[in-house]
Amino acid sequence: MRYAVIDSNNYVVNIALWDGVSEWSPGPGLILIQLQEEQLVDIGWTYDEETGLFTDPNPRILQE
């Protein structure tokens, strides 16, 4: 399973693969958010605790 590793400022600092069972910790002050298989998230994105949504701070601008 994929997990977003979130710091205290709600930034994604890493993406981890973890079985969810083995003993493992992302580190002090970091939390894990399990991602859906098709969910697009990358390092540097922000996480909104209230909505559970991730946001790309530099979204691509499509030119016509």
Image (cartoon, rainbow, N blue to C red):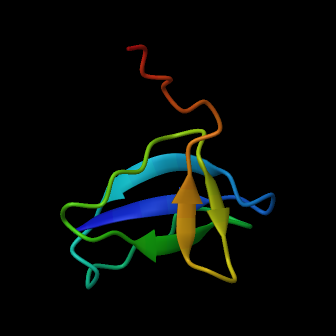
- Taking depth in this image into account, of 19 and 4 the one nearest to the observer is 4
Residue reaching furthest to the front: 64
* Residue 37 against residue 45 in the figure, above or below: below
Q: Quadrant of the C terminus?
A: top left
| Residue 6 screen position, x and y as percent | 61, 61
> What residue do we see at 44% from left, 42% from top?
42
Q: Is residue 9 left or right of residue 13?
A: right
- Residue 57: x and y, percent? 65, 38
Task: Please indicate whether residue 26 sits to the left or right of residue 29 in the image.
Answer: left
Residue nearest the observer in this picture, 61 or 54: 61
Q: Is 32 above or below relative to 43?
A: below
The relative height of residue 13 versus residue 62 in the rendered view (above or below) is below
Relative horizontal placement of residue 18, taking residue 9 as reference (left or right)? left
Nearer to me, 35 or 40:
40
Give the residue at x 34% y 51%: 40
Image point (43%, 14%), residue name: 63
**On screen, 63 above or below 2?**
above
Q: Residue 5 versus residue 11: which sits nearer the camera?
A: 11
- Residue most toward the right? 9
Residue at the (46%, 60%) spot, across then down: 4
Give the quadrant of the N terminus.
bottom left
Place of residue 10 in the rendered image (x, y in percent of width and height, measured from the top left): 72, 60
